[in-house]
Image (cartoon, rainbow, N blue to C red):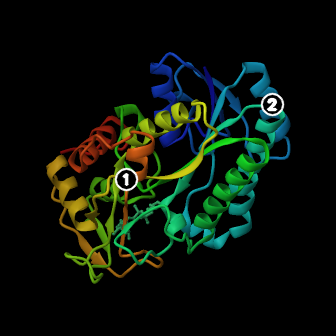
Amino acid sequence: MTTLVTGGAGYIGAHVVRLLEQRGERVVVVDDLSTGSASRIGDAVLVKLDVASPEAVGVLTATMREHGVDAVIHFAARKQVGESVERPAYYYQQNVGGLTNVITAMEAATVDRLVFSSSAATYGNPSSAVVEEKLHAEPINPYGETKLIGEWLGRAAARAWGLRFVALRYFNVAGAGWDDLGDPAVLNLVPMVLERLGRGEKPLIFGDDYPTPDGTCIRDYIHVRDLAEAHIAAIDYLGKDERPHDTFNVGTGKGASVREVIDQIGVASGLDATPEIRGRRAGDPAQLVASPDRINEVLGWKAQHSFEEIVASAWSAWQAGPRRIDV
Ligand code: UFG
């Protein structure tokens, strides 16, 4: 079995590459190394390429043929919500254009299994406390739009030529499966808190007047190792005889508030993590928690790691990295 992983040098992709290699499978990573690092992919073959570039279809098709690729996991994309609001055409070009190139090459090389990184951002600002996949998806920013369009494209290719397609809607990914694979970007709550603590500053809470028990936003935090395992389950599912195409939430079904996350970082690190309250950040839904029932049922996947383990592993990887904090 040979799997081509676009974005395999990134935070989530590198976890999946490591799991595939541990299963003894061959892996070809396609990555432009704009945010990822070649040091994270072990013995996998690396093809340096921006999947949204004009030459991508040709290079991807040739790579799939040369290595006898059986399945593709497509991570390579831009993922900053704020940037997507500023630069919508760039996000459509990178995320929709990138996926279009990947599917075009797959059809040319007759590779028919694809797992696609979608996002809870497709739900926008949902009215229900726990979201199910059948809920009408209504993204509220260009990033979420590109992910929803990606799901439509996959579904259309499934109908048109039999692409076997699974979209995984990630909730809030955090932690590290291995100390050398922590989240290198400081864009999300857990690394942002660690970064501030490292500078001797108080962690920030963006809004404590939300309609939630402690007034701070609630999210469904998923351990990156569990998320990586969900991709393995999806690849196995696509190898079965039926011709499936489907969308699954990847979350735990349990929410944690911003305040609880910060408190837990204080517990894991032994540092004083007393927060400072700031105003609300634009576009944040008060609560976003997955119903994981479908993925539990259909893929037999269930999150194994607790909220405490997510935070402890994030701390451990942070301390193993270049921004280690003296305690
Ligand atoms: N927050 C703080 N202080 C910080 C950083 C974040 O209070 O220093 C708050 C945010 O306001 C938000 C919560 O922590 O309420 C989580 O924020 P993140 O930026 O970590 O994550 P988001 O929920 O905004 O978005 C993330 C991904 C998106 C994805 C979404 C799906 O970044 O790509 O999860 O749930 F779409």
Between circles 2 and 1, the one closer to the viewer is 1
Tell me, for residue 71, which label it has, or none: none
- Residue under the image location 37 percent in, 49 percent down: 174
Q: Position of residue 77 (x, y in %)?
A: 63, 51
On screen, residue 73 versus residue 90, left or right, reads left
In this rendering, the answer to whether 20 lies above or below 214 is above
In terms of sequence position, does the residue under pointer 2 or pointer 1 come before the other? Answer: 2
SS class, disc 2: loop
Q: Amino acid at mark 2?
A: Ala
Tell me, for residue 293, which label it has, or none: 1
Quarter of the image with the N terminus is: top right
For disc 2, the marked residue is 109
Q: Position of residue 49 (x, y in %)?
A: 73, 37
Q: Residue furthest top?
A: 24
SS class, disc 1: helix
Label 2 neighbour load within 10 Å: few <14, some 14-19, many 20+: some
In this rendering, the answer to whether 18 lies above or below 327 is above
How far is disc 2 from disc 1 in space, using C-alphas? Answer: 35 Å
Q: Mark 1 and ligand 1: say if the CB distance to the nearest ligand atom is below 8 Å.
A: no
The one of 187 and 174 positioned closer to us in this rendering? 174
Can the viewer see residue 183 in this picture?
Answer: no
Q: Position of residue 79 (x, y in %)?
A: 56, 57
